[in-house]
Amino acid sequence: MFARGGAANAVDDRSWLAAMLDVEAALARVCARHDLCPAEAAEAITDATADVSRFDIDAMGREAGQTGTPVLALVRALRVAVGDVYAPYVHLGATSQDIVDTAAMLVSRRALEPILADAGLAADACATLAIEHRETVMVGRTLLQPALPTTFGLRVAGWMVGLDETRATLRAVREHALAVQMGGGVGTLAAFGDKGLAIAADLAAELELPEPTLPWHTIRNRPAALAGALGAMSGVLSKIAGDVVLMTQGEVGELREGGGAGRGASSAMPQKRNPVAAVMATACGRRVPGLVAGLLGAMAQELERAAGAWQSEAATLSELLRVVGAQVAWVRDLLENLDVDVERMRANVEAAGDLLMAESVVTALTPHVGLVQARSLVDRAVARVKEGDVTLGQALRTNVDVVDALGADGIDAALAPDEYLGVSGELIDRALAAHRATAV
Amino acid sequence: MFARGGAANAVDDRSWLAAMLDVEAALARVCARHDLCPAEAAEAITDATADVSRFDIDAMGREAGQTGTPVLALVRALRVAVGDVYAPYVHLGATSQDIVDTAAMLVSRRALEPILADAGLAADACATLAIEHRETVMVGRTLLQPALPTTFGLRVAGWMVGLDETRATLRAVREHALAVQMGGGVGTLAAFGDKGLAIAADLAAELELPEPTLPWHTIRNRPAALAGALGAMSGVLSKIAGDVVLMTQGEVGELREGGGAGRGASSAMPQKRNPVAAVMATACGRRVPGLVAGLLGAMAQELERAAGAWQSEAATLSELLRVVGAQVAWVRDLLENLDVDVERMRANVEAAGDLLMAESVVTALTPHVGLVQARSLVDRAVARVKEGDVTLGQALRTNVDVVDALGADGIDAALAPDEYLGVSGELIDRALAAHRATAV
Amino acid sequence: MFARGGAANAVDDRSWLAAMLDVEAALARVCARHDLCPAEAAEAITDATADVSRFDIDAMGREAGQTGTPVLALVRALRVAVGDVYAPYVHLGATSQDIVDTAAMLVSRRALEPILADAGLAADACATLAIEHRETVMVGRTLLQPALPTTFGLRVAGWMVGLDETRATLRAVREHALAVQMGGGVGTLAAFGDKGLAIAADLAAELELPEPTLPWHTIRNRPAALAGALGAMSGVLSKIAGDVVLMTQGEVGELREGGGAGRGASSAMPQKRNPVAAVMATACGRRVPGLVAGLLGAMAQELERAAGAWQSEAATLSELLRVVGAQVAWVRDLLENLDVDVERMRANVEAAGDLLMAESVVTALTPHVGLVQARSLVDRAVARVKEGDVTLGQALRTNVDVVDALGADGIDAALAPDEYLGVSGELIDRALAAHRATAV
Amino acid sequence: MFARGGAANAVDDRSWLAAMLDVEAALARVCARHDLCPAEAAEAITDATADVSRFDIDAMGREAGQTGTPVLALVRALRVAVGDVYAPYVHLGATSQDIVDTAAMLVSRRALEPILADAGLAADACATLAIEHRETVMVGRTLLQPALPTTFGLRVAGWMVGLDETRATLRAVREHALAVQMGGGVGTLAAFGDKGLAIAADLAAELELPEPTLPWHTIRNRPAALAGALGAMSGVLSKIAGDVVLMTQGEVGELREGGGAGRGASSAMPQKRNPVAAVMATACGRRVPGLVAGLLGAMAQELERAAGAWQSEAATLSELLRVVGAQVAWVRDLLENLDVDVERMRANVEAAGDLLMAESVVTALTPHVGLVQARSLVDRAVARVKEGDVTLGQALRTNVDVVDALGADGIDAALAPDEYLGVSGELIDRALAAHRATAV
C-alpha cells in the first residue's frame, strides 16, 4: 500500500517478465549470429518480446504458483507468440536459471537507476545544506546528551559522505557484479557445442552486462554484493532519517519537515505536523537487514542448481530493491524540503548551559599553565557547578588562577560555543570536495 | 509471481482495506450503543463499509505513499461515502493506529484460517503415511550418513508431531494474542470520557477479538507471539520439505512427488521430474526467519507511538503470513501426493551393508557375555570389516565366542534390520494418539 | 567484555560441561534401575560427574574444535574418570545429540532462573512506579511529537504489562518446552531393546524435565519456542530502555538514571551523566532478533541428524540467553534506580502549549452543541492558533459560541491536562491487578 | 567450545585490549610530535602499553559490565601505569569511541590475516583439484536430480572463483574501509585546536590505517562493508561445505573427508566416518547472515554518538570474525584433505542412465536434420524410455531416421557423457588463469 520511488515499478511482475523476454530475445539474436537459428526466427522472437502486454501475466503467475518457475509458462507463451516455425528456436541452449538470473541482473540494473539518482540528489541536497550551515552552531549530542558544540553543517556533511561512499560502492556493484548468467543445464554450455564461450560472451555484450569468469548459477557472490551495497546505503539513509526524527521532536524543534500541505497530518490530532518522510524512511530501513540476511543465507546453493535457496532469491531481491528505493525517495524528499530552525539550534545551545564548554576551557588554559594544572582548575570549577547554582563561567571568573591565565576576555572566548568548533569548517570543505568529485 | 495458498488473498491490499473498514464500522456501532453517535450514523457507516469495491484502492495506496498512513485517505473516503451528515461520526475517538492494529489482528486471524486448515490436513496426511509405513524399514541417516535402521513411519510421525505441536501454539496465539487495540491518541481513551473501558470492551466483543489488559500500541508482544508461532511452524515445514528433497535424490530415490502431469518438468531437460513442492516449500521457509526477526526488531517502539518501527510492521506481517501460507500449501500438497518407494528403501538398507547393525549385535550379545565383552567382540569384528572385504556377518560368524553366545540364528537375528527398530512402533502409536487428540 | 546478569555464568563452557555430565549421570542411574548397568557403575559415574573441575575443559574444547562435537572428548574423559571396570557403562544407549540436546535444556532452564527473577523484579519496580505516578501528568508523544496528555503511571503500566505477559510466556516455555531428548542413534531407542520408552520416561523424571511425545532430535520447535519467548521479552525490554533514553535527553529531562557514583561518566566530558543502563539494554536488545532468526533458520534439520544446522544451535542459544540475561539485568537496575522529575514533566506539558488540548475541547463541547458543531468550532480556533500568536485558550475565550456553551470555567476545565486523562487511572489499576496475579 | 582458526585469538578480550592500548600509545606519540605532550610522556605511555599482561583484564571487564564502556577502566589503568606525571597525557583529545572504533579496525585487520590466508590456501587447494579433475566426469545435479554430465573439475573451479572473487572484495575492504576514527567528543576535533586535521592524519599514518574524509563515528558504512564482504565469503564457504556434505552421502559416495585418524568418529556408531569439516563449516555459515544483519541494523546511529546501536557492534563484529575465521579454517582443511572417488563418480554417471544424454542427442542431430526434427525425434525416444524398459540408446538405435542421420557410431558418441561436456575445460582454464592472477 505504500509504494514510493521509481524502483517499485522496476521490480514488479511486469518488469520481471519484460526482463526475461529481453534475455530470450537477446539469446535468439546471438544464436542467429552463430548460425544456430535462422535470422528470421531471431527477428520474430525479438518482435514477439517487444510488447509485454501481449502476455497474460496473471495466468503465467498462476502457473508459476503451480510449477515453481515462471520460465516454463514464459517459454510456452513465447513459442505460441512466434508460431510453430520459429518456436523451436525459443530458449535455445538455455536453462530456466540462465533466464531468471540474467533477468534478475537486468531488473536490478534498472531498479538501481532511480535509486542512484535519488541518492545523488539526496547527497546534493546535503551539500547545499552543508554550505549554508557551515557556521550554524548547534548542540552536539552523544548518547542523546548534550556534549559539545558542533555545526549543523558538519552533521549534514557526515550524512553526505555516507551517501557518497555508499553510492560509489553501489555504482561499482552495478558496473562489475551484475553479470550475465549463461551456463545451460549444468554450467558446461554443452548444448552450444564448442560455441559456448562465444555465445556467453556475445549475450553479455548484447545485454551490456559484464561477462563472468564462470557461470555463477550456484556461486552467488554477485547477488550478495548487490545486497550488501544496498544494505550499507540503507543504513546511511536510516541514520539520516533517525537524526531528523530526533531533531523534529517537540522539545528539540531544530528541524521541521517541509513538503506540501497536509503532509504530516494526523487522523485524530489536528495540531500535529509529523515528520512523515523521516518516519517512513526509518520504517523502510528497518526491513532491510533481514532482506540482506535472506540473500546471504541463500548463498549455500546445492551442486548445479539449488533446491530452494535459489528459488527464494527473486522475491527477496525485489523487495530489497523496492524498499531501499522507497527509502531513498523519502530521504531525498526530506532533504530537499527541510526547514532548519537556526534560532532554535542557538537557543538549545544556550539552554544546554556553559558546562558544554568545559573541555574548551581546558584547551584554552593549557598553553598558559600546562595541561595538568589546566585540567585541575577546570575540574574544580565543574565540581562547583555540580554542587550548586553557579554556572561554569561564574566559577571560572571567581578563580584567580584562571583569570590570571586567560583574562576576562579569554574566559569569554573559551566559553563561546562558536569559538570551539575545531576543524569543523575544514572537514565540511573536505567533504564537499569529495562530493564534487563524485559528480564527474 | 508465485502466490499460492489461501493466505495470500487474506493479506492483500483489498483485505487490509476491508479489515480497516470493519473496524471503523464496528467502532461506529459501539459508539451508537453508548450514545456517542446516532444509530442511523452507525448504520450508514456499516453500510458504506460493506462493499470494499466502492473504494478506490489504488488512489488510497498512492496517497498512503505520500502521507505514510492509509488511514487518512480511508477516513476521508468513508466520510464522503456516508455523506456530510454522518461524516463527523466516522473514526470517533480513534487514532490511526487503533484502526491499523485492530485491522492487522483481523487480517491475521483470517489468514490463519487457511494456514491452520492446510497444516491440519498436512498432519492428517502424515498420520495416513505413518500408519501405512509403521513397519517400512529404511536407512536412518545422521549427518546424511547411514547410521541405523529406522522406519519411514517413524520419520513421518516426527513430521506430524512437529506440525501438531506448532499448530497448537498457533491456535493458542490466534485465540489469545490477537487482541483489539483501542486507545485513542495516546492510550488513555480520553475522547470517550469515562466510557473508554466500556467502549474498548464492546469493540472487542463486536469484532470477536480478546480484550487486552491495556492498549498495546507500543507494547508489541502480540505481533511478536504471532511471528514466533509462524516461524516455528515454518521451521517444521522446512524440515519436512528438506527431507523430501533429500529422499527424492536420484541416488536415493525413496520418494517421488506426485501431483498432476507436468509437475516438476524442466525447461531444458525433458527427462526430469523435479521435487517442485519440496523445493518451493524450502524456498518459502528460507524467507521466514528474517521476517520474524523484522517483527521482533520492531518491538522497540517509542513512547506513545513509534516513529518507524510500527510503520514497518504491516508489510512484514503480511509477507510473513503470505509466505508461511504458501509454504504450508506446498507441504500439504506434497504430503497428500507422495509416492513412497518401499522397495527402494529396502534396497538402500541392503546397500548400506550390515555395518549398520553393529550396535544391534552389541545389544544382542550383552545378555550372554556382558556389556564389556560384547563391545570388545563387536569392535574387533568391525575392525576386520574396515580392514578388508569381509562383511560384519562374515566376521561374526567366524568368531567362536560370538557363535557360542548367539548361535547362527542369533547372529542372523542381530543382523536383521527389521529386528532392530527399538520402540519405533510404540512411538508412532503415541504420536498418532496425540494427533487424534488435536482433532477434538 | 561486558558480561552482566546471572545468565552469563549459566551458559559458559563450564556450565555446559556440568549439564552434559548431569545427563550422563542421570542416564547411568536410570540404566541401573533397569538392570542395564550395575548400581555401582551408576554410582561411580554419578560421583565422577559431581565435580566439573576434574575435567580439563580447555583440552576438551580444543578437541571439540577438531572433532566438531564435545561429546567424544567428554565420554572418553568420563570413562577414564570412572576406571576400566565401569567405563563401558558410560553413555549407554545414547547418541551425542541426546546428551547435547538434553544438556541444552538443562542449561536453558538454569539460565532462565536469573532471567525470570530479574524480569519479575523489573515488573515489580514498574508496579511501584505506576502506583506512585498514577496521577503524574506528562506529555504523551506520538512519532516523538507532543500529542495529548497522559500519565507517567500509564506509560510504566504498559511496560509492566509487557514484562508480565512475556514472563508468563517464558515461564510456560520453561515448564513445557524444555523436554528431555533421548532417542539413541536415530530416534528408535533400539539399544535399549524394549525398554526404550521406560528409560526415556525415567530419564525425564530424573532430570525433572517433561517427556516429549517423540524424540525431537530433528523436530526443533522446542528451541524455537524458547527463542521466540526470549525474543518477545527482549523486545519489551528494548521498548522500556528506548523510552528511558528518550526521556533522559537534555531537552526533555524527565528521567535520569540513578545508580552508584561514577555511573554514566564520560571519558572525555566531565559534565556528562549518560543513561548507561538504558543504552546497554538497547545494545543488548539489538542483537536478539538475529539470534532468534538463527535458531528458527536452524530448524530445517536433515533426516535423523542435521549436517550443520543442529551444530549451529548451541552457540546461538548460549548467546541468546546471555544477551537477554544481560539486558534484563540492566533494565531491572534501571527501573529500580530511576529518578523521575515530576516538575520537568509538568513543565514540558506547559511548554507543549494548549494545542495539546484541542481534542479535549471537542469532547467538552459535544454534549452542548453536537459533535459536528463542536468540531467546527475547534477547527476554526486551531486554525487561528496556527495563523498567529494566539493560544488555543485565547481563541476559544473570544468565541461567543464556545463561551456560551462552556462558560469560562468550562473552557478552563477543557484546557486542563489533568482533566483529560481518560481512563488512565482505571487502566493502571487493571494492569496492577494483573501484575499481582502473576505473583501467585 | 569450538574455537578454530586464527581469527578467534585475534578477537578475544586480550586482543581488543591490546588494540585499544595501541591506539592510546599511537595517539600519545602523535601528540608529542605536535607538542601537545612531552616526548617522555609519549614514551612512557608507549612503554606501558607494550605488555597487555600488566593489565587486569578480568577486573576491567567487570567494570565495563558496570559502566558500559571498556575505555574508562582502560584510561584509568593506563594512567596508573604511567604514573602521576604523565597521567594527564593519556587519552589526549580523544573520546571513548575514537579508541574503540580505531581498535575495532586494528582488531579486524589482524583477524583478516588468517582469514585471508586460509581463504587463499583453500582456493589453491581448489586449483589443484580443478587441474587434477579437469576431465573427471560426474553427474551434474539440479534440484539434486541428475541433469547432465559435468566434471568435478568444473564444480571445483566454481568454488575457486567464488573464493577468489570474495577474497578480492575482502582484501579491498581491508585496504580501504578499515580507516582510523578520530573525532573527539562530537567529531570536530576541537580539543586539538587547529591541529585536528594534522593529528588525525598522523594517527592514521602511525597505525597504517587509511584516513577517512570525515570522522565516521555515526556514519557506519565502514563496518557494514566489512560485514558484507565477510558475509559474501561465508556464503561461498557454505556452498562448498554443502556440496561436500551431499557428495559424501552414503548413497552418493563421491567424496570422503580425509584428515587424521579419529576424524569423523561417532560417539555411538563405530562404523561411521562423518564429514566433520563440512558439517562444522556449514554450522558456522548458518550463523553469519544474522550477524551481518546485526551490523547493518546498527548503522542507524543517533546524532553524534548512538545510544545502543554503536554499543552493540563490537560483540557482533568479534563473533562475525571468529565464526568466519573458523569456517574458512574448516573449509581449507576440508579441501586440502579431500578424497575424491573418481570411480564412484563414473559409476554414478552409469547408474543415472542415458536419459542424461537426451539434450546431447538433440545437439548431435541438429546439423543433420534441423533443430525441429531433431527435437521431435528425441522427444519420441524419451517418451518410449518413460513408457517401458528400453534405454534411450535402444530407442534411438531402433529409429531409422536417427540411425540414418548419425550412424551407430554417431549415436554412441552422442550418448557418451565424456563427449558432452561443452566448454567445461576452457572454463576451468579461464578460472585457473584468474586464480593465478590473484596471487600476484
Image (cartoon, coloured by chain):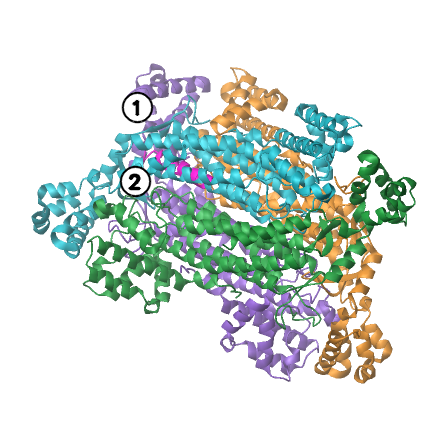
Chain colours: A orange, B cyan, C green, D purple
- What is the chief secondary structure element of the magenta stretch? helix
Which quadrant of the figure has residue A140?
bottom right
Q: Amino acid at mark 1?
A: Thr
Residue B427: assigned label? 2
CA neighbours of label 2 inside 10 A, class few (<14), some (14 to 19), many (20+): many
Decide whether residue B244 is among the magenta residues.
Answer: yes
Label 1 in the same subunit as label 2? no
- Foreground: A171 or A280? A280
- Foreground: D439 or B92? B92
Q: Is residue C179 above or below residue A42?
A: below
Residue A192 at least partly seen:
yes
Q: Residue at x 63, y 62 (%)?
A: D210
Tag 2, which chain? B
Q: Amino acid at mark 2?
A: Leu
Residue that label 1 marks: D391
Decide whether residue B377 is among the magenta residues.
Answer: no
CA neighbours of label 1 inside 10 A, class few (<14), some (14 to 19), many (20+): some
- Considering the image in quadrants, where does the N terminus of chain A appear? top right
Find the magenta span and give its range. B233-255
